[in-house]
Amino acid sequence: MRIIWSPLSIERVTEIAKHIRRDDPAIAQLVVDTIFESVEKLSEFPESGAMNPEANRKDIRQLVVKNHRIIYRVESESILILTVRHSRQLLEGDVIAEK
């Protein structure tokens, strides 16, 4: 399956990297690399993430990587990465709204 990153998800990963980079640039790179590697695995195992509890929909799932949740939607031929959030942050409703 094809992986598609939403503009919001790319923005969030960039923000995460900038925040961590202030304290430790090497750790920031490690976190970003781990996020991207975890997402790549979804192309073969799209339903490997748990259902997202806020969405309560079978097509909206999440992976937990380090202290971050990767929220994604499984579509017929692709996986759309909706956002990446710190594990303590709740999602806004518009992120998981219908297409």
Image (cartoon, helix red, strand yellow):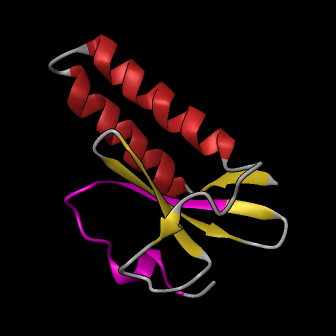
Answer whether residue 86 is magenta in the image. Answer: yes
Q: Is residue 50 above or below residue 29?
A: below
At horizontal 43% and vertical 47% (from top left) the residue drawn is 11
Q: Which residues are magenta?
A: 80-97
Q: Quadrant of residue 88?
A: bottom left
Q: Is residue 1 left or right of residue 46?
A: right
Quadrant of residue 28 within the rendered picture: top left
Q: Is residue 91 above or below residue 94?
A: above
| Residue beneath the point at 33% across and 48% down | 68
Check if residue 90 falls in the magenta segment: yes
- 66 relative to 9 in the view: left or right: left
Left or right? Give the position of 67 relative to 75. Answer: left
Q: Is residue 75 above or below residue 69?
A: below
Q: Quadrant of the C terminus?
A: bottom right
Residue 74 x %, y %: 68, 69
| Residue, far top | 26
Residue 17 drawn at (x, y percent): 33, 31
Q: Is residue 31 above or below residue 87?
A: above
Q: Residue at x 44, y 30 (%)?
A: 32
Q: Position of residue 73 (x, y in %)?
A: 61, 69
